[in-house]
Image (cartoon, coloured by chain):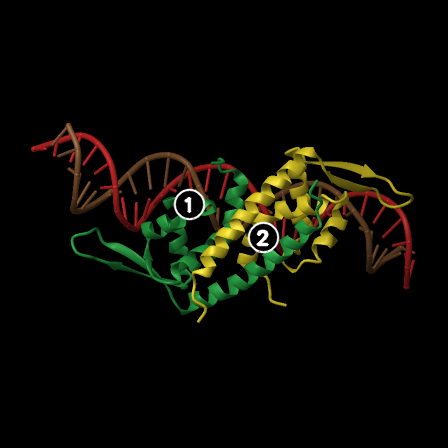
Chain colours: A yellow, B green, C red, D brown
Amino acid sequence: MKAESKWDVQLRKGSLELVILAALQPKALYGLELLNYLHEFETMKISEGTLYPLLDRLKREGIIDANWVQEGELRPRKYYTLNQQGQQRLTDMNARWQQSVNDIHALLKRTKTN
Amino acid sequence: MKAESKWDVQLRKGSLELVILAALQPKALYGLELLNYLHEFETMKISEGTLYPLLDRLKREGIIDANWVQEGELRPRKYYTLNQQGQQRLTDMNARWQQSVNDIHALLKRTKTN
DNA sequence: ATATTATACTTTGTAGTACAAGGTATAATG
DNA sequence: CATTATACCTTGTACTACAAAGTATAATAT
C-alpha cells in the first residue's frame, strides 16, 4: 500500500464529516466501533485523535447525540446517534458532495490522458 | 443560489489542487483566466486571495512553471503551465480521488433515504 | 484633465480542520 | 503482578483556504 501523503489528508478533510454522518445513519455506533468500520475503507483510515474531537464537535453543533451505555461487565461505551438535524445535514451534504464530484469529473474529462 | 457554508470551503480544500492541475493540463493559463474558468463550476468559485498563493505553492513544489508574457500593449500576464512532474502528480491525484469517491459512494449507499 | 473602472497580480492575518503523540482508566490475559 | 486490549480524551502543530486590502497600469467616462 502507498504511504499516505499530505494531500491524502487534505482530500479527506472535506469529506470526513459527511462520511461520519453517513456511517452513523443506519445505526448508532460507539467510538472505536465507528473507527474500525471506517478502516474498511482505504481512504478513511483515521486515528482516534482525529475521530473523538470530531465527534465532540458534531455533538456541540447539535447534529449527533451521545449517550453512555453500560453493557454487562464491559467498559461503558459512548454511543453516537444521528438526530433529525443530523439527518438533514447529511442530506444537504450529500447533494453538495455530488455536485462537487460532477464538477471535478467535468474538469478531469477535459484533460488528455497521454 | 445557496450561500456558501463553512463546509463547502472544507470540501473544496482537498480537491482544489487537483482541480487546478486539471485545468492547466490542456493548455497554459494566466491567473485571472484560470479564475474565470473555474467560475464556470458552481463548487469552484474561489477568489484571487485563494488562487495566487496556491499557484505560488505549486510552483515552489516544482509541479507547475510560470513565465511572464507581454502581449502587445496589454498588461503582462503570468502564464502557468503543467510540467512533467505536474502531469505525474495529476495522474496520481486522479487515481486517489477516484478511490476516495468510490469509498464515499459505498458508505452513502448503506444509508437509508427515508 | 482627471476620476473611475477593468485588468492583473500580491500580501497579510485569520479560522478551521486533521493529525500524531501522548494520556487516563478498567478489565482480561499470561 | 506485569502486560495486553479496550475505550475514550487532551495537547500542540501543520496545512490550507479565505477575506480584505494593496500595488500598478491602461482604457473609458465625465
Chain designation of label 2: A
- Residue A84, how many percent across, how many down? 69, 34
Q: Secondary structure at mark 1?
A: loop
Horizontally, residue C16 falls left or right of residue C5, namely right
Chain designation of label 1: B
The disc labelled 1 sits on which kind of residue? Answer: Ile
Q: Which residue is situated farthest in the bottom direction here?
A: A114
- Residue C16, how many percent across, how many down? 55, 40
For the residues labelled 2 and 1, the Cα–Cα distance comes to 20 Å
Horizontally, residue A75 falls left or right of residue B30, namely right
Horizontally, residue B49 falls left or right of residue A105, namely left
Q: Nearer the viewer, residue A90 or A54?
A: A90
State which quarter of the image contains the C terminus of chain A.
Answer: bottom left
The disc labelled 2 sits on which kind of residue? Answer: Arg
- Residue D29, how many percent across, how many down? 17, 33
Q: Which residue is mark 2?
A: A12
Q: Nearer the viewer, residue B96 or B63?
A: B96
